């Protein structure tokens, strides 16, 4: 068995344990497909302005050491990642403090590609949520609401991914702050996700949505991919965090179990 197969087996075993245990009784995950929602990490990925570069250094080679090993350096909010509460609320929860049961969550997907294509600064409204619910049913309590903007297709073009203008401004869609509050207060969701580099639209320098999530120790997922392979409802996500002590976030492996 290769190292990759061994790690995959461990992940699946952990999922089964998480799904079948818990104080609320047995839980199950029924799926027909498994989809990886994480981007491959290399030194050319889009990075938020001012964030540290991705670096790899070989520290052991077969010819010298008999095995291959690298060290790497990456920002806590780079690549597909999860933000921790302490990144937007002083004294908030670090990424190492998120309990395991919070990392296996149902997901719903809202496709706003058409609106985002004509308006890169588009923000999801409460009316958008209500219209989605008329078609797909009420958002299940405890879900992560994923915004499918189409920005996953811009990943290999950092300028397009951030929508940089001549003044250095950022233009990409996201959640309106009032919509986020509605989702938490009226639908009791667990958090939000998106395929852009920010749950807040690029023009929102107050980070209203990230602040709302952080105040509630919720789930904040950014730079997701392969959202075109998910249905509007029924998917279960497994969030593979790195438990970085007091971390403001973590690069993330997101596995989707699709019914």
Image (cartoon, rainbow, N blue to C red):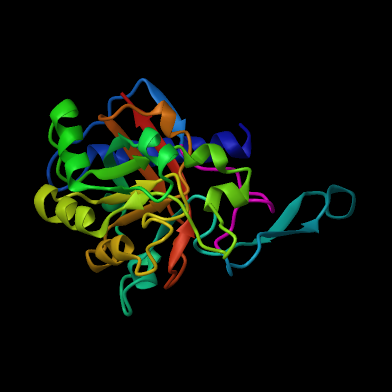
Q: Quadrant of the C terminus?
A: top left
Give me the residue at 90% from left, 49% from top.
63
Left or right position of 196 against 30: right
* Relative image position of residue 62 (x, y in whole percent): 84, 48
Return the residue found at the far left: 186
Does residue 141 lie above or below 167 as drawn?
above
* Relative image position of residue 198 (x, y in whole percent): 42, 56
On the question of residue 177 being in view, the answer is yes
User: Is 173 in front, or is 40?
Assistant: 173
Q: Quadrant of the N terminus?
A: top right
Does residue 31 lie above or below 187 as drawn?
above
Magenta includes 43? yes
The part of the image, by quadrant, that contains residue 108 is top left
* Relative image position of residue 246 (x, y in whole percent): 42, 73
Is the stretch drawn in magenta largely helix, strand or loop? loop
The part of the image, by quadrant, that contains residue 56 is bottom right
Left or right position of 222 against 61: left
Give me the residue at 17% from left, 26% from top.
135
User: Is 255 in front, or is 216?
Assistant: 216
Query: Bounds of the magenta span?
Result: 37-48
């Amino acid at each position: 068995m290769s190292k990759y197969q061994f790690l995959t087996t461990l992940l699946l075993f952990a999922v089964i344990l998480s799904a079948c245990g818990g104080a609320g009784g047995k839980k199950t995950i029924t799926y027909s497909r498994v989809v990886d929602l994480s981007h491959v990490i290399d030194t050319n990925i889009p990075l938020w302005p001012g964030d540290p570069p991705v670096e790899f250094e070989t520290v052991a080679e077969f010819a010298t050491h008999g095995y291959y090993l690298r060290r790497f350096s990456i920002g806590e909010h780079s690549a597909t990642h999860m933000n921790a509460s302490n990144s937007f609320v002083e004294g908030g929860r670090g990424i190492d403090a998120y309990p395991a049961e919070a990392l296996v969550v149902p997901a719903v997907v809202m496709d706003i590609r058409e609106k985002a294509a004509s308006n890169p600064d588009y923000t999801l409204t409460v009316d958008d949520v209500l219209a989605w619910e008329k078609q797909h049913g009420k958002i299940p309590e405890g879900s992560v609401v994923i915004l499918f903007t189409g920005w996953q297709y811009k990943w290999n073009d950092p300028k397009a991914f951030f929508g940089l203008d001549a003044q250095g401004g950022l233009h990409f869609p996201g959640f309106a702050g009032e919509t986020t509050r509605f989702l938490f207060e009226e639908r009791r969701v667990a958090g939000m996700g998106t395929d852009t580099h920010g749950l807040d639209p690029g023009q929102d320098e107050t980070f209203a949505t990230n602040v709302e999530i952080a105040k509630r120790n919720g789930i904040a997922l950014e730079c997701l991919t392969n959202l075109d392979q998910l249905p509007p409802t029924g998917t279960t996500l497994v969030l593979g965090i790195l438990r970085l002590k007091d971390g403001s976030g973590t690069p993330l492996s997101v596995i989707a179990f699709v019914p």
